[in-house]
Amino acid sequence: MKDKLVRFGVSLEGELLRRFDAYIGVEGYDNRSKAIADLIRKEFVSDAFRRGEDVAGAVTIVYDHHKREVVNHILDIQHDHGGIIISSQHVHLDHDNCLEIVAVKGRGAQVKLLADALKSIKGVKHATLSVTGTGK
Ligand code: NI
């Protein structure tokens, strides 16, 4: 159910507002309200993550599949964290490299544990964790 919109006034220093308008223009917003709402939600997601509350997100890793021990290690860790993994997508980037996107939903601390475990595997060339809200 969509919540009713409420208007409120905000007072900002002129220079801060000019920078904000420039920023949201670059980001593609055509009005301040949506940009402010998104910034608030972004901060709430960060806060939920820090507090260990439920978040959703994606861990993205790149690795060379020729190193079989790396592949096995990645699989072991994903099975160990199966409770928070929604799905994973594997893409063959080129002859050597694989990209894997692991969609997760769970407590912030658990999500971080999984991301850290995957990131620290010797042979994983690159890893990122993107955290977003659960939509609630
Ligand atoms: Ni592959």
Image (tube, rainbow, N blue to C red):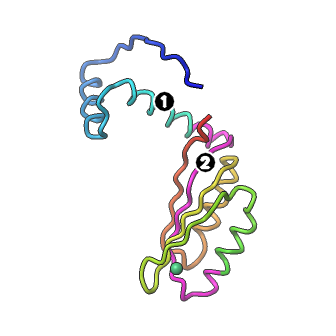
Residue at position x 56%, y 60% in the image: 59
Residue drawn at x 58%, y 78% is 122
Asked if the residue under mark 1 is in contact with the one under mark 2, i.e. CB atoms within 8 Å, the reply is no
**Callout 2 amino acid:** Ala
Magenta-tinted stretch: 46-71
- Mark earlier in primary sequence (2, 1): 1
Q: Quadrant of residue 66?
A: bottom right
Q: Quadrant of residue 100?
A: bottom right
Q: Within the magenta stretch, is there residue 10?
A: no
* Above or below for 15 versus 8: below
Distance from the alpha carbon under mark 2 to that under mark 1: 17 Å
With respect to residue 15, does 39 lie above or below? Answer: below
**Direction from residue 90 to residue 21 in the image, left or right:** left
Secondary element at image label 1: helix
Q: Is residue 21 above or below residue 28?
A: above
Residue 136 place in picture, x, y as percent: 62, 34
Does residue 81 appear left or right of residue 124 in this picture?
right
Viewer-closest of 2 and 58: 2
Q: Nearer the viewer, residue 15 or 9?
A: 9
User: For the point 24% across and 26% down, which residue is it?
Assistant: 18
In this rendering, the label closer to the viewer, 2 or 1? 2
Residue shown at 73%/62% (left/top)?
Answer: 81
- Identify the disc placed on residue 87: none
Q: Nearer the viewer, residue 38 or 70?
A: 38
Q: Pick whichever, 123 or 80, lies toward us.
A: 80
Residue matched to label 1: 40
Relative image position of residue 75 (x, y in whole percent) = 68, 74
Residue 69, given in percent of the width and then of the height, sits at 64, 85
Q: Secondary structure at mark 2?
A: strand
Is residue 53 part of the magenta span, yes or no?
yes
| Mark 1 nearby-residue class (10 Å; few <14, some 14–19, many ≥20) | few
Q: Which residue is mark 2?
A: 56
